[in-house]
Amino acid sequence: MIEALSGGRCPACGDVAVPYAHRCPACLRGAPCEPVALSGAGRVTQFTVLHTATGRFAAPYVVGFVAVPEGATLYCRIEGEDGARPDVRVGDPVRLEDHEGELRCVAEGAR
Amino acid sequence: VSGRESLASIEGVGLHPFGSHPDRSLGDLAAVAIEGALADSGREASDIDIAFVGNSLGGPLAGQETIRGQVALRSSGLTGLPIVNVENACASSSSALHAAVMAVRSGLYATALVVGVEKMYIGDTSRTLQALGGASTAGLYATHGLQFTSLYAMAAKTYLDQGGATLEDFALVSVKNAANGARNDVAQFRKERTVEQVLASRPIAEPLTLLMCCGIADGAAAAVVTARGSHDRSVGIIASALRSGQYRPAGSTVPSSVAITADVAYHQAGVDPSDVGVVELHDAAAPQELLHLEDLGLTGDRRGWELIRAGETALDGRLPVNPSGGLMARGHAIGATGLAQVAELVTQLRGEAGERQARIERPIGLALNTGGRTVDDRAAIAVTLLAR
């Protein structure tokens, strides 16, 4: 399980923080939090297209915020099914997966 | 300082021009700013009891890790005294100023030197972006290619979706800050721009164009800080608020970390937002200026665009904002930016800004400097209030 795909449920207030924190950052009362594996489901809440390449990613590429049903929102680079640049819209479903120890966020349902 | 009690005083400030200075080391840049601050304060180098040096990227980009202050200040002849290295992403030098205020306020040191210095031009944008990625939680850059402009772009899209503001309003911010920068001899970009030029420049992070975003810069800023100013050009620090970004549970209605930090500052000083007469804020991208004005309580929610459209944030407006040209025109040499903002406010409050002197109706200045990104929020937020 990679860190970005695991959260912690607070024994005091029930909040789930992602990634895992030993003591609950929401209420500061609960510790230790109980590890929770994310389902891998998510939805795009915001996104943009970046036009400057980094060492690893050619431009343009898509990044955004993805809300997971467990309650957190994660910053992710969003890929198409075949690694291509996806045609993303707000509300689109994504799949979060462990790809060789690294979090990958794939847009589902290519248009 | 108008009867209001100050936490500390700034006796003098100095700057090294922001821009591309490939032949200058961190020490060379710092030396110019330090000489300026000493001359401005009427102090000798031997008067300095402690120094706080803000820098962020000296490790990856200038090849100097962990003792950058000691290495840089040797060029100014400063050895032996306590030198504290302060690193807090783009808020490094406002964090250093915060530490200096604590040092002189505690009574342990009489005279503190604060320095912010940064070198970002290395002729390889990809490496600079990688170093900037280091200002976020590890993995956000490596795995996801985080660029700070993407955060500003997404905030801008949300702001546009709320209605009222348009892309042209963002361009107006760029135009105003370019006009101010054109009048500032330490600014990196000294060219006036038009709305059409801003909108037509190349896309960086949709919907932001190149001229809506700050660039990278080399530069330095310095200030001499004491508990009580020794001369009548001293400017009081009436609040120094520093916070970190925070975790927000899903559905949280906790205000933004900028709003929380500003409230701490207003409370420290015992002033209201309506008392602020001049502002230097963190316009890393044009829409941030509008969002920050709202978070700082300087206008109503979703009303920031009205100020820029009505010219109220221009040099001759009701509330001049970024008279230096801001991050976009003065430049953003990240570890130097916070102190450069404060230096500009000192100059403005003294009425010494020459061609870019703002019309200041209320003699209180506010600096907002933010830095870095965690998985939850901005990493560091500093709000400093100055009074003359």
Image: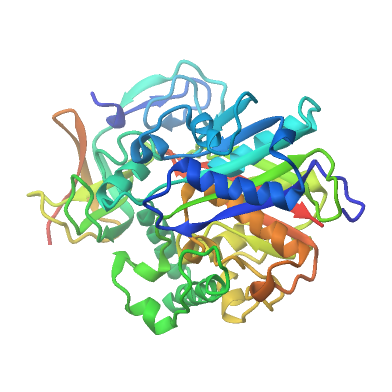
Picture residue at 30% right of the left edge, 43% below the top: B130
Q: Position of residue B45 (x, y in %)?
A: 69, 38
Q: Residue furthest top?
A: A32
In the rendered image, which quarter is residue B230 located in?
top right
Q: Nearer the viewer, residue A52 or B11?
A: B11
Picture residue at 47% right of the left edge, 66% below the top: B286
In the image, residue B165 above or below residue B46:
below
Residue B377 visible in the displayed image: no
Q: Nearer the viewer, residue A18 or B318?
A: B318
Q: Position of residue B77 (x, y in %)?
A: 59, 34
In the image, residue B149 above or below residue B78:
below
Q: Nearer the viewer, residue A66 or B33?
A: B33
Asked whether, in this view, residue B162 is left or right of residue B228, the answer is left
Q: Residue furthest left?
A: A82
Q: Position of residue B142 (x, y in %)?
A: 26, 38
Picture residue at 61% right of the left edge, 34% below the top: B52
Asked whether, in this view, residue B45 is left or right of residue B88, the answer is right
Q: Quadrant of the C terminus of chain B?
A: bottom right
Asked whether, in this view, residue B353 is left or right of residue B211, the answer is right
Residue B321 visible in the displayed image: yes
Q: Nearer the viewer, residue B47 or B106?
A: B47
